[in-house]
Amino acid sequence: MKSILALLLSFCTCLALAQDTLCVIQVSNTEKKLTIKVTQDPYILSTLNLDSDFRFSGQVLQDPVTKQSKLKTFVYHESKDRYVLIHASENKLDTATCANRKNATQEFGLHKVYSHKFEHELSYGCKSTCAAGVLQ
């Protein structure tokens, strides 16, 4: 009985700390959205290839021990036969934001990235929204 209770409590903790994050990316008057799912695998990224030779990748990485999560975003531009990293960002997700608060959001600001090669700008903003007291 104790082992079942411990398993249920650990499952609830994971659910309470799991967050999905929505990023809105804008390039050349075109807006794209990318939902980034929580993962504990540092090699899993959500990626969006954009029309103007930009690539946007993001990850919500959860530490398997502490259950703390962080949002990591990356912007690349295509150069010959590969993508070159031109911007990286890392933000801690605050799980306390959702404590007993529905529809609260945690926003991570507006990022503007310029690629001199293409003379284009990419801008993006990401946010996590609480639903029923759980940061998603």
Image (cartoon, grey):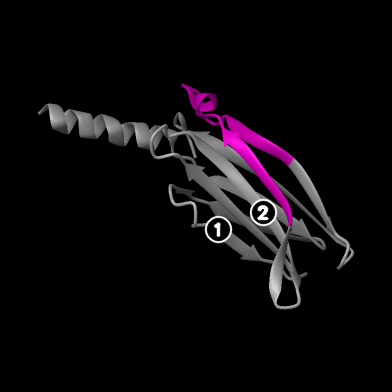
Q: Which residue: 37% across, 37% down?
A: 15
Q: Which residue: 51% across, 24% down?
A: 96
Between tags 2 and 1, which lies in front? Answer: 2
**Any mark on residue 46, and which?**
1
Q: From which residue to which does the magenta span run?
A: 86-109
Residues at marks 2 and 1 touching, judged by CB atoms closer than 8 Å: no
Residue topped by disc 2: 74
Say which label, 2 or 1, has the lower sequence index.
Answer: 1
Query: Can you say whether 15 is above or below 86 in the image?
Result: above
Q: Is residue 112 left or right of residue 36?
A: right
Q: What's the distance in space between the residues labelled 2 and 1, CA to CA? A: 10 Å
Q: Is residue 31 left or right of residue 105?
A: right
Q: Tag 2, which secondary structure?
A: strand
Residue 64 position within the rendered picture, expressed as x and y whole percent measured from the top left: 39, 40
Residue 87 position within the rendered picture, expressed as x and y whole percent measured from the top left: 74, 52
Residue 131 position within the rendered picture, expressed as x and y whole percent measured from the top left: 48, 35
Q: Amino acid at mark 2?
A: Phe
Residue 18 position within the rendered picture, expressed as x and y whole percent measured from the top left: 44, 39
**Any mark on residue 3, and which?**
none
The single residue placed furthest to the left in the displayed view is 1
Q: Is residue 44 magenta?
A: no
Q: Is residue 40 left or right of residue 72?
A: left
6 or 81, which is in the foreground?
Answer: 81
Q: Is residue 88 magenta?
A: yes
Q: Which residue: 49% across, 50% down?
A: 37
